[in-house]
Amino acid sequence: MIEFQHVTKRYEGQFTALRDVNFALERGEMAFLTGHSGAGKSTLLKLIMLMERPTAGQVLVGGQALEHTPRRRIPYIRRHIGVVFQNHQLLFDRTVFDNVAMPLEVTGVPPRDIARRVRAALDKVGLLKKEQLNPVSLSGGEQQRVGIARAVVNKPPLLLADEPTGNLDPALSTEIMELFREFSRVGVCVLVATHDIDLIEGMERRVLTLSEGQLTGDGPVSTMEGAHGG
Ligand SMILES: Nc1ncnc2c1ncn2[C@@H]1O[C@H](COP(=O)(O)OP(=O)(O)OP(=O)(O)O)[C@@H](O)[C@H]1O
């Protein structure tokens, strides 16, 4: 589903954020991306979302090389990638329902289908009863679940999360991870960037570790040498 082939990213000013990174993630696979602050986690996610372009190497999503993607195709590719952020990025002047409906509205899905799909997504994250509330009145964990419902309402084959549990306590964080795990069980490829080593250790999933832009670890939790303290 995602493949990095010898990917290097050098920002202007010659700062090398990623160096010769190689890995592949399959459909339905769930993996964590970890590393110290500045290790290159967000850069790696941005390359997948086409928010940045590699300086060298290839990024493939769904078997397609992104290298020559024309600008006009970028929104189409992004539609197939669900993204969850730490700070939810919800709109507080709209209801929960409307927040989740947004990705469908911009792609012109008929209103009847929107209602059905929004409710299916809210049901998955356990928030069906709160659809008419404003996100302001929800807890942090609930707001994050609204963000997840919005990320998956398009049924994307790929879900990326950047520090999705940054503001949540351990119990809520585990709940959010369980949700991601359920999506991976139904075939969604899930990549979660996080500093939260304790959380990762409980999940028994593949862990990609970045250190100063290099992929220094790729394996189960036990091989995460040097990942602590980042
Ligand atoms: N647009 C940019 N221009 C120049 N340098 C950048 C840019 N974006 C990121 N960098 C640099 O690239 C390096 C990697 O940054 P990145 O945000 O990918 O790290 P990260 O692992 O996500 O860090 P954190 O965990 O703190 O979010 C950092 O040193 C950062 O300063």
Image (spheres, rainbow, N blue to C red):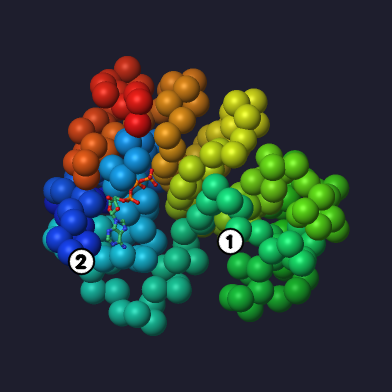
Q: Residue at x 26, y 66 (%)?
A: 53
Per the rendering, the mark at residue 154 is: 1
**Mark 2 residue type:** Glu
Q: Classify residue 223 as left or right of residue 57.
A: right
Q: Position of residue 10 (x, y in %)?
A: 18, 59
Q: Residue at x 20, y 33 (%)?
A: 216
Give the residue at mark 2.
12
**Mark 1 residue type:** Asn
Q: CA distance from mark 1 to mark 2?
A: 34 Å
Q: Classify residue 126 as left or right of residue 176.
A: right
Q: Residue at x 31, y 51 (%)?
A: 44
Q: Position of residue 121 (x, y in %)?
A: 69, 52
In which quadrant of the rendered image does the C terminus lie? top left
Give the secondary structure at mark 2.
Answer: loop
Whether disc 2's CB lies below 8 Å from ligand 1 is answered yes
Which comes sooner in the sequence, label 1 or label 2? Answer: 2
Per the rendering, the mark at residue 208 is: none
Give the secondary structure at mark 1.
Answer: loop
Q: Is residue 138 visible?
A: yes
